[in-house]
Image (spheres, rainbow, N blue to C red):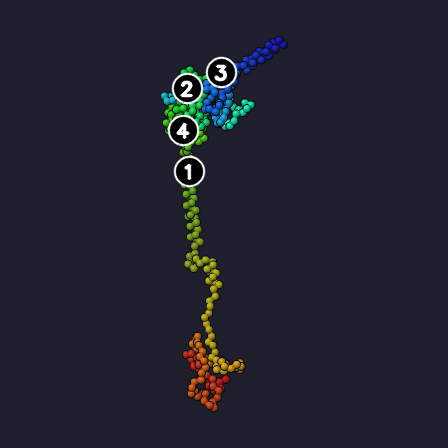
Amino acid sequence: MTHSCHLFLLLLLQAAMLVNAAQIHTIRVGFAGGHVFDPTTTTADVGDLVVFEFFPTNHSVVRGEYTESEACGSSQCNPCVPYELIHPGQTGFHSENFLTQTVSTNGDVPTFNITIGDNFPIWFYCTALDSCHPNGMVGVINPAEGQSIDTQKSAAINADYQLVPGQSWPAEGSSPSSQPNSTSPPSKNSKSQKVSGGAIAGIVIGILLATVLTAALVFFVRRTRQRNAPKNPEDSLSLTERDAEEQTVPVSMEFEPATPRTQNDLVSPISPPPQRKKSILHFYKYPFAEKPLVAPKGHPALRSGGGRNTTSEFEGEEEYIGRGSR
């Protein structure tokens, strides 16, 4: 029983020592509306917790590298470049951007925490627009001997550009040891403008395939029209024209000659008696104009004592019907 109590007290003591050993370090990001980390330099032990508190308006925390680090060779490192670009295969940290418009009165602010796992220096910067460059918004946890926050800040102010995690080196750069000389920093929210060779090949293949399909479609349409085209010109008439031709009725211009009328037919108010049919063929000019009936002077048929005579005169024709023709 006594041994068990001693063991329990020993465990409680070790737990208390661990709790007291782990400390919390707070760094205020953009405090008082400036492009600063407060404090810029922090010393923490392994197992300590570092809490970044974000203030208005838009800030972030990204791990970077010291400007005079051996990782960049003879050239100086850009303090505003993500850690993983300088150390391929390794991973830094990124808090993402915290957009804060007002300061909470109860002290409730957005935070980002990291736990210290070793004693190596941890340099960081802010990726908000114009923060790291040209305002030199940088900070450090556990700087190594000979490293200076002032040197890092000066290098950030004079940097050519700043990058966000996920972006690649500018087109002029080939490796972290050879820093680009670009004078215009890329946009904070822009993405890499590089196009992979596979994407270019896919675009070319797509264009060629579309061209081939278009040519095949045109050939098929023309071939179909040639097969359906009529061989005889008459077959090329449209259905409307054919219907019009079939429904057209030829108009006959034949006229029967009018039967000559006698004087009694013209002057008698009483309808004449029916005439006997005569098989006499007469020829007339058509059309003809009938002249008024005038008794010719000295005509034998109109002498006194003569029978009834009928005389009809027409333009271009004269016909005489003898006595008793009716």
* x and y, in percent, of residue 269 in the image: 52, 81
First in sequence, mark 1 or 3: give its number.
Answer: 3
To which residue does mark 3 refer? 45
- Of badges 3 and 4, nearer the viewer stands 4
Tell me how far mark 2 sits from mark 3, CA to CA. 23 Å
What residue appears at the point 40 percent right and 21 percent down from the top-left corner?
A: 154
Q: Is residue 114 visible?
A: no
Q: Are there few (<14), some (14-19), or many (20+) residues within 10 Å of tag 2?
A: few
- Of badges 1 and 3, nearer the viewer stands 3
To which residue does mark 1 refer? 203
To which residue does mark 2 refer? 150
First in sequence, mark 2 or 1: give its number.
Answer: 2
Give the residue type at disc 2: Asp
SS at mark 2 in the image? helix
Give the residue type at disc 4: Pro
Tag 1 near tag 4, CB within 8 Å: no
Q: In the picture, residue 5 is in which quadrant? A: top right
SS at mark 4 in the image? loop
- Of badges 2 and 1, nearer the viewer stands 2
- Of badges 2 and 4, nearer the viewer stands 2
Please tell me whether residue 195 is drawn above or below residue 231 in the rendered image: above
To which residue does mark 4 refer? 185
Give the residue type at disc 3: Asp
